[in-house]
Amino acid sequence: MRFDKIREANGIKHRLTKPNHPWTNGQVERMNRTIKDATVKRYLYESLDQLRTNLADFMAAYNFARRLKTLGGLTPYEYICKVWTSEPDRFIVNPIHQMPGLNN
């Protein structure tokens, strides 16, 4: 009950992994560890706003600058744009419109 109240108050969706797909949960846990290592385990925050700012900066750097071996050396954003050009029907929104900068 408390979990649901806090989750809803912060606009967080609660999604469960698919049955018989345990690797999905492992992927989520690994990303959670990556985020934790880059934020709360590395810095001491004086306020929640400092944490939010650092988290937003980390996510922007991860999605738009970090090249991943599993994506063939592309950033997550570059990979999504590559998939969008070959399979646009899979997307609701054009991912090019999500790029930070002057088009925002």
Image (cartoon, rainbow, N blue to C red):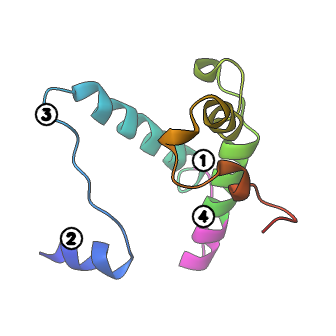
Horizontal relation, residue 97 to residue 46: left or right: right
**The residue stretch that appears in magenta:** 42-53
Disc 2 residue crowd, few under 14, some 14–19, many 20+, Cα 10 Å: few
Q: Residue 86, located in which quarter of the rendered image?
A: top right
The numbered mark at residue 44 is 4
Residue 21 is at least partly visible in this image:
yes
51 in the magenta segment: yes
Q: What's the amino acid at mark 1?
A: Ala
Where residue 82 sits: x, y (%)? 68, 31
- The residue to which callout 2 is attached is 3
Q: What's the amino acid at mark 4?
A: Leu
Which is nearer the N-term, disc 4 or disc 3?
3
Up-down: is 33 above or below 67?
Answer: below
Q: What's the amino acid at mark 3?
A: Pro
Which is nearer the N-term, disc 3 or disc 1?
3
Which is nearer the N-term, disc 3 or disc 2?
2
The nearer-to-camera label among 4 and 3 is: 3
- The residue to which callout 1 is attached is 38
